[in-house]
Amino acid sequence: MYLLARVERVSKLCENVNEYLLRLDRKLGSKPGQFVMVWMPRVGEIPISVAWEKDSLLKLIIARKGVVTSYIHNNIREGCRFFLRGPLGKGFEITQGEALIVAGGYGAAPMLYLASMLREAGSRVTVALGFRENRNVMLVEEFEKLADRVFVATEDGSVGFKGQLTELVSSILSSSRYDIVYTCGREQMMERVVRMAMNAGIEVQASLERLIKCGIGICGSCTLEPQGLRVCWDGPVFNGYKLIQVDDFGKWWRDASGKRVPLPT
Ligand SMILES: Cc1cc2nc3c(=O)[nH]c(=O)nc-3n(C[C@H](O)[C@H](O)[C@H](O)COP(=O)(O)OP(=O)(O)OC[C@H]3O[C@@H](n4cnc5c(N)ncnc54)[C@H](O)[C@@H]3O)c2cc1C
Ligand code: FES
């Protein structure tokens, strides 16, 4: 079932990443970590995480990548209307306690919504964000309003900690005790974070990306081997215990023809 979305505002968050505030014709009713399929007629349909929703307002954060995302960046303005379907997939489980959110690049998109739900549930929230360089940094002030502590890492050291996000996470995990870690971003980064958390005996949940076609568990485009888990249906959020048994995690995905190929770096 499609929902009609009208664009209320478009804001640039950083180079190549825009935020779209949409008014829907009815409430979506999503959980953090769930996604919608955004349909651009005659161009394509792509999965985008829910970045925030309240009543009939919905935020999506979209990075320019290829055909459909570039079309959206170039053509979708205030007042435009388009259709989307969702909410799809399984989101993050909201727990109470000390939570650490680890997000790289536009992987931060679904984590603001998660942080606000964790706070509502009474959790204390620490956030670690990683970006390549200054021009990719986004949402830091928004996280600072919601979270108890926010750390930023950039690979070139232009903002915050200089180095990889995983190095920052390693020092955060060794200095405080957490009940749960949530992560979203590049899968190679998430694989390291999942292993670090599990080695420290901490529950961990990660949100994966694959090529999504149907979005409802039918076509097999997004399956993870060897279990045949479908990212669009069984995920995109999986817990660490499941992920460490998945051969594809951090290594393989399927291209548009369905062939298993190395994960893009
Ligand atoms: C559950 C889920 C949630 C997502 N949430 C967001 C979000 O909130 N914001 C956002 O900007 N993006 C998100 N993405 C990624 C987004 O769907 C892709 O960037 C988009 O589909 C690319 O479409 P395109 O037509 O612009 O690129 P294409 O022209 O199809 O491809 C351009 C390049 O991007 C690669 N690519 C295509 N699809 C994906 C993908 N799913 N993941 C990684 N690389 C891909 C291709 O291999 C190719 O190298 C999400 C993906 C999933 C699976
Ligand atoms: S995209 Fe079709 S099964 Fe997941």
Image (cartoon, grey):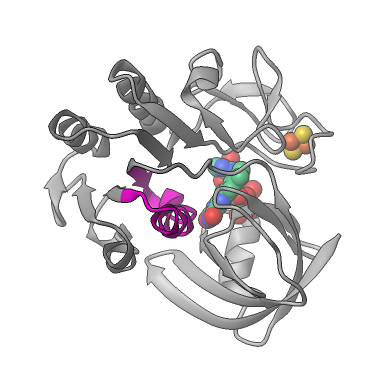
Q: Position of residue 13 (x, y in %)?
A: 39, 69
Taking the image in four quarters, ligand 2 sits in the one at top right
Q: In the rendered view, would you say 200 is above or below 49?
A: above
Q: Which residues, given as a range, are shown in magenta?
A: 99-124
Q: In the rendered view, would you say 259 is above or below 187?
A: above
How many numbered marks, from 0 up?
0
Q: Residue at x 21, y 31 (%)?
A: 173
Asked if one can make out residue 202 in the rendered structure from this viewpoint, the answer is yes
| Magenta span contains residue 121 | yes
Quarter of the image containing the N terminus?
A: bottom right
* Residue closer to the observer: 67 or 56: 56
Based on the displayed image, in which of its 4 quarters is residue 190 positioned?
top left
Quarter of the image containing the C terminus?
A: top left
Question: Position of 212 compared to 121: left or right?
Answer: right
| Magenta span contains residue 103 | yes
Q: Residue at x 23, y 54 (%)?
A: 150
Q: Residue at x 46, y 53 (%)?
A: 114
Question: Position of 67 compared to 168: left or right?
Answer: right
Q: Position of residue 49 (x, y in %)?
A: 58, 54
Q: Residue at x 36, y 32 (%)?
A: 189
Based on the displayed image, in which of its 4 quarters is residue 229 positioned?
top right
Q: In the rendered view, would you say 169 is above or below 70?
A: above
Question: Position of 163 compared to 101: left or right?
Answer: left
Asked if one can make out residue 65 in the rendered structure from this viewpoint, the answer is no
Furthest-bottom residue in this view = 79
Question: Position of 250 compared to 73: left or right?
Answer: left
Based on the displayed image, in which of its 4 quarters is residue 72 positioned?
bottom right
Q: Position of residue 187 (x, y in %)?
A: 45, 32
* Residue closer to the observer: 121 or 61: 121
* Residue closer to the observer: 207 or 74: 207
